[in-house]
């Protein structure tokens, strides 16, 4: 990819910081070293940085002001004291992003992009440029790929590293399965499935449209992704925009990432995140979502006979669901389907000891799909953007029938018993 000749939108990186004197310097230094997609340093002033030093008892704000003398970007330092009900990770990020939005609105164009990261994180050298490139391709929000600080990660021991590698591999294979069976033209493979405040960005217009960052003590990053999705905005999960974050155990909020890491370090077989599920139920979920997305984009939800049996819904319930969601973003339909269909409920969280066999099962599915010509790489050419729904794939679709046997891609095959309880083998 060559450097675009058009001017990028104005951008502000919002960083909430609470007693971060030990780490804020490395965070700002990483932003000072940002490069474009050809490896050249980004021009001075390509973006601004705003640090919200909230409730600080150390020299965080003073260090930031000192750094401004050498920074190749305008650096705004805002000191404030958040009230007890707001003095948490979500409240601080909301205040920082709101301040960045106000800064953009005071500019000449009153548009632009808000990026946010954490004071204990370090942006990859192309985080800003890769993020802006995704916006140039039509995204309304961009979720960066988040990795752990390698030195801190290795210091936690071989067992913790082995656990993390298993979880990462499973997450990658799951993302590939989604990209193959539920492709979205605005978020092509390779991608990921994580929303983290350590590296997320949103247009000013989208941010204002959803009322800003949802106020949550924890999980504000996932909450933002959810409200953007439900409003029909397009989120790109970029692997080219990446951020490295710390592995410290001292959470800035009870129940945060640090507490989770500490618990898993103490018990290496403690349950994984709740959205890691077994291959059999995962396949059912991904395939169903892809089918419903295509029907929704094509305006064919009313043909309920093809999908209501699969979800265990009677005719009236399916018709009511189709009517309620036909003119709304697909996310509304999917939230309702997940809530109303027991077959799609996620069971008990997986433990690391179960991951090797589940990874093998998902990889077996991916190989089977590839033999049928269904893959994450091919999905972008198979499903061009549809005029029926912004960013949704268009495809001709033959509804399911209880009398038909189909392979994982939805292609009819002769009836044969499944080899692993997940899907019938393809015809040879």
Image (spheres, rainbow, N blue to C red):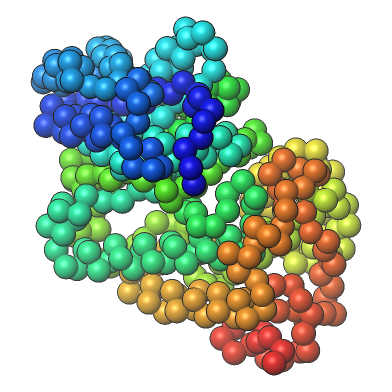
Tally of numbered tags? 0
Q: Position of residue 400 (x, y in %)?
A: 81, 69
Looking at the image, which residue is at 47% across and 54% down? 192
Q: Is residue 329 left or right of residue 346?
A: right
Indicate the quadrant where residue 410 lies.
Answer: bottom right
Q: Is residue 428 above or below residue 24?
A: below
Q: Position of residue 385 (x, y in %)?
A: 73, 48
User: Does residue 363 appear anywhere in the picture?
Assistant: yes
Q: Is residue 148 above or below residue 123?
A: below
Q: Is residue 167 left or right of residue 358?
A: left
Q: Is residue 78 above or below residue 356?
A: above
Q: Position of residue 51 (x, y in %)?
A: 28, 20
Looking at the image, which residue is at 41% across and 36% down? 129
Q: Residue 318 or 287: which is nearer the viewer?
A: 287
Looking at the image, which residue is at 49% across and 70% down? 278
Q: Residue 124 or 317: which is nearer the viewer?
A: 124
Looking at the image, which residue is at 29% across and 62% down? 164
Q: Position of residue 359 (x, y in %)?
A: 43, 74
Q: Quadrant of the C terminus?
A: bottom right
């Amino acid at each position: 990819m060559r450097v675009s000749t058009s001017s990028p939108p104005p951008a502000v990186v919002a960083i909430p910081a609470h007693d971060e004197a030990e780490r804020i310097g490395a965070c700002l230094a990483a932003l000072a070293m940002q490069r474009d997609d050809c490896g050249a340093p980004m021009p001075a002033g390509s973006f601004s940085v705003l640090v919200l030093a909230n409730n600080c008892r150390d020299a965080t704000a003073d260090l930031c002001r000192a750094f401004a003398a050498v920074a190749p970007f305008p650096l705004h330092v805002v000191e404030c004291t958040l009230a007890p009900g707001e003095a948490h990770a979500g409240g601080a990020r909301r205040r920082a992003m709101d301040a960045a939005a106000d800064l953009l609105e005071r500019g000449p164009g009153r548009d632009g992009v808000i990026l946010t990261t954490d004071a204990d994180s370090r942006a990859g050298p192309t985080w800003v440029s890769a993020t802006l490139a995704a916006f140039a391709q039509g995204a309304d929000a961009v979720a960066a790929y988040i990795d752990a600080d390698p030195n801190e990660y290795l210091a936690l021991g071989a067992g913790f590293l082995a656990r993390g590698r298993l979880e990462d591999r499973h997450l990658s294979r799951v993302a590939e399965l989604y990209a193959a069976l539920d492709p979205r033209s605005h978020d092509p493979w390779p991608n990921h499935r994580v929303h983290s405040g350590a590296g997320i960005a949103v247009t000013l217009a989208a941010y204002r449209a959803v009322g800003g960052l949802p106020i949550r003590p924890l999980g504000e990053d996932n909450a933002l992704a959810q409200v953007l999705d439900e409003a029909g905005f397009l989120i790109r999960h970029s692997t080219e925009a990446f951020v490295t974050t710390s592995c410290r155990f001292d959470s800035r909020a009870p129940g945060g990432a640090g507490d989770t890491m500490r618990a898993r370090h103490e018990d290496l077989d403690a349950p994984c995140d709740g959205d890691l599920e077994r291959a059999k139920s995962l396949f059912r979920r991904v395939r169903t979502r892809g089918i419903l997305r295509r029907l929704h984009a094509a305006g064919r939800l009313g043909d309920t006979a093809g999908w209501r049996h699969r979800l265990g819904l009677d005719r009236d319930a399916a018709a009511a669901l189709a009517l309620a969601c036909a003119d709304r973003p697909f996310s509304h339909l999917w939230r309702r389907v997940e809530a109303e269909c027991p077959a799609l409920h996620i069971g008990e969280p997986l433990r690391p000891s179960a991951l090797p066999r589940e990874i093998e099962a998902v990889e077996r599915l991916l190989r089977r799909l590839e033999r049928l010509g269904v893959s994450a790489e091919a999905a972008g050419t198979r499903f061009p953007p549809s005029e029926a729904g912004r960013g949704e794939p268009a495809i001709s679709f033959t509804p399911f029938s209880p009398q038909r046997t189909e392979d994982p891609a939805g292609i009819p095959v002769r009836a044969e018993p499944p080899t692993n309880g997940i899907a019938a083998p393809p015809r040879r």
